[in-house]
C-alpha cells in the first residue's frame, strides 16, 4: 500500500505542476510573442521546462511601429541588465526619438539604439530602417547557435547563457511591419489539457485516500480483541 500511495502522490505532484504551467499559458494567451513551455520530468521526477519557439500567428494591426518576425529570430533590446532578446515587436518611440519596448528598453540596430526622426518610416523585410526614403540603419535581428541557451526572464524577455550558445545573424528571418506575433498557444487546447490535469490530480487524491483507508482497516483487523 505504501508503494501505491507513493506512486499516487508522485502522479499528483506532476499533475499539479502541469496545472500551474497550463494556467500560466492561459494567462499569457494574449501576450504578444509569448512562447509556451513543455513540461517533462527526469528520473528523479524533477521538473524540466523546455521552451517551444514555434511560430505564433501573425496578427495585422496596421500600426507602423508594430513589427513581427517570420521565421527563427529575435529583436535585441538594451536593458539595465544588459542585452536581452524578444519576439514582442509592440514598439513605440520615447521622448528622445528612440524606438523602445513597452517597458522603455531601446531596440538595437546594427549601429546601436534605433532612433526614428523621419516623418515617413518604413521597415524592410531584412530589418532595414528606412526614413524619408533613405536607409539609416538595420534592426539587429539575431538567433542562437542553440536556442536552449536562452532563459526566460519575464516581460517577454530572454537572456543568453554564453556557456551554452552564442548569437548569430537571423539571415532567414523576415520582418513584417504592421503586424504582431500572437502567443504560440491555442486557448481551447490548453483548457482541454487543464481539465485533464485536474481530473488526474483528483484521481490521484482518491487513490491515496483509498489506500490510507485500506491500511487503517488492516491495522484495526490486526489488533487483538
Image: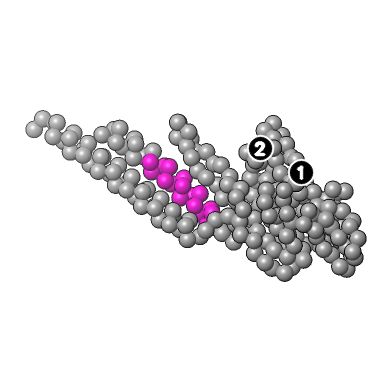
Main SS of the magenta part reads helix
For the point 67% across and 33% down, the residue is 164
Observer-nearest of 30 and 124? 124
- Badge 1 element: strand
Q: Earlier in the sequence, mark 1 or mark 2?
A: 2
Q: Is residue 11 above or below residue 164?
A: below
Q: Is residue 118 left or right of residue 168?
A: right
Which residue is identified by label 2?
Answer: 146
Q: Is residue 146 left or right of residue 113?
A: left
Observer-nearest of 133 and 142? 133
Residue range corresponding to the magenta coloring: 11-27
Please identify the quarter of the rendering in which residue 216 is found.
Answer: top left
Q: Position of residue 52 (x, y in %)?
A: 58, 47
For the point 61% across and 56% down, the residue is 56
Which residue is identified by label 1?
Answer: 169
Q: Is residue 169 above or below residue 178?
A: above
For the point 83% across and 52% down, the residue is 138
Q: Position of residue 49 (x, y in %)?
A: 54, 41
Amino acid at each position: 500500500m505504501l508503494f501505491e500511495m507513493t506512486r499516487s502522490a508522485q502522479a499528483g505532484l506532476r499533475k499539479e505542476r502541469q496545472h500551474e504551467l497550463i494556467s500560466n499559458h492561459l494567462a499569457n494567451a494574449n501576450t504578444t510573442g509569448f512562447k509556451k513551455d513543455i513540461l517533462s520530468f527526469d528520473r528523479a521526477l524533477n521538473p524540466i521546462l523546455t521552451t517551444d519557439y514555434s511560430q505564433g500567428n501573425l496578427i495585422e494591426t496596421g500600426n507602423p511601429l508594430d513589427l513581427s518576425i517570420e521565421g527563427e529570430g529575435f529583436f535585441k533590446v538594451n536593458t539595465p541588465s544588459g542585452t536581452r532578446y524578444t519576439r514582442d515587436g509592440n514598439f513605440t518611440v520615447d521622448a528622445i526619438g528612440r524606438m523602445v519596448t513597452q517597458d522603455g528598453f531601446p531596440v538595437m540596430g546594427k549601429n546601436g539604439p534605433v532612433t526614428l526622426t523621419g516623418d515617413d518610416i518604413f521597415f524592410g523585410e531584412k530589418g532595414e530602417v528606412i526614413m524619408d526614403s533613405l536607409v539609416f540603419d538595420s534592426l539587429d535581428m539575431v538567433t542562437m547557435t542553440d536556442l536552449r541557451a536562452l532563459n526566460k526572464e519575464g516581460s517577454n524577455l530572454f537572456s543568453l547563457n554564453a556557456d551554452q550558445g552564442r548569437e548569430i545573424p537571423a539571415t532567414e528571418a523576415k520582418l513584417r511591419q504592421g503586424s504582431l506575433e500572437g502567443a504560440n498557444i491555442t486557448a481551447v487546447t490548453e483548457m482541454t489539457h487543464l481539465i485533464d490535469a485536474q481530473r488526474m490530480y483528483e484521481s490521484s487524491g482518491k487513490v491515496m485516500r483509498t489506500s490510507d483507508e485500506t491500511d487503517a482497516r488492516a491495522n484495526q483487523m490486526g489488533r487483538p480483541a
